[in-house]
Image (spheres, rainbow, N blue to C red):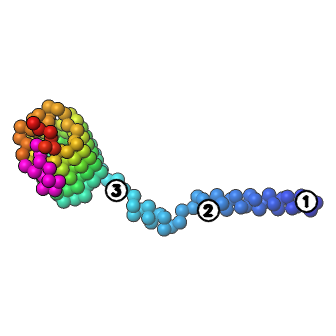
Amino acid sequence: MRRKLRRWIQGFLLLLGLAVLAMLLMARPAIAEVLVAQTSPDTVNYNNANLQNQDFSHQNLSGKAFVGAEMRGINFEGSNLANAIFTKGVLLDANLRGVDLTGALFDRVFLLGADLTNAVLQEATATRTSFQDVTITGADFTDAILDRFEIAQLCDRAAGVNPTTQVATRDSLGCR
């Protein structure tokens, strides 16, 4: 009888210990939740939004998504748009002066008449994107992926040196 009682107690203690261990492993201290809330990325995006003539100047919009957004006449001057996503976007006559577009993705975007003066587009990807009548004085396209036709068009009007990176626009495009 004592052996059965001892085994039962041992089994119960083992089960209780495993339950406590499981609770400890699954528990998150309150401080961890506060830290996660403070460090979690901002998930706001502007997909399919009408942002026509809006002022987003001098803002940190790094990593934001502007998929299918209407951005005619938008003002992004001096903003951080590193790693932002612009797919199927319309940026006609947009102000992108001095913008950081490092690593940004442009796919099927219309930039007709946009101003990219002194913008940094290092390592950006711009596929099936139109740069027609875009001002690129001082823009830095170092290691950017652009369609060959667009590069040829951009080289016709490439001039200036980027004040941030000190790279000439013509050099960054590989113009001859």
Q: Report the quarter where the N terminus lies.
A: bottom right
Q: Residue at x 39, y 63 (%)?
A: 38
Q: Is residue 103 above or below residue 108?
A: below
Magenta stretch secondary structure, dominant? loop
Counting other residues with Cα less than 10 Å from the Cα at mark 2, is it few (<14), some (14-19), or many (20 or more)? few
Q: Is residue 37 visible?
A: yes
Which amino acid is tagged 3?
Answer: Asp
User: Whole-percent x and y of residue 52?
Assistant: 16, 48
Instruction: Tell me the tag on residue 24.
Output: 2
Which residue in the rendered view is the most extreme toward the right? 1
Which amino acid is tagged 1?
Answer: Arg
User: Whole-percent x and y of residue 25?
Assistant: 60, 59
Q: What SS does tag 1 mark? A: helix
Q: Which is more toward the observer, 140 or 101? A: 140
Q: Which is more toward the observer, 75 or 149? A: 149
Instruction: Tell me the tag on residue 42.
Output: 3
* Tag 1 and tag 3, C-beta contact below 8 Å: no
User: Whole-percent x and y of residue 96?
Assistant: 14, 51
Which residue was labeled with disc 1? 3
Residue 135 covered by magenta stretch: no
Between label 1 and label 3, give the one nearer the viewer. Answer: 1
Mark 1 and mark 3: Cα distance apart in space: 60 Å
The magenta-colored residue range is 160-170
Mark 2 and mark 3: Cα distance apart in space: 30 Å
User: Whole-percent x and y of residue 168?
Assistant: 11, 48
Mark 2 and mark 1: Cα distance apart in space: 31 Å
Q: Which is more toward the observer, 9 or 101? A: 101
Mark closest to the chain's N terminus, 1 or 3: 1
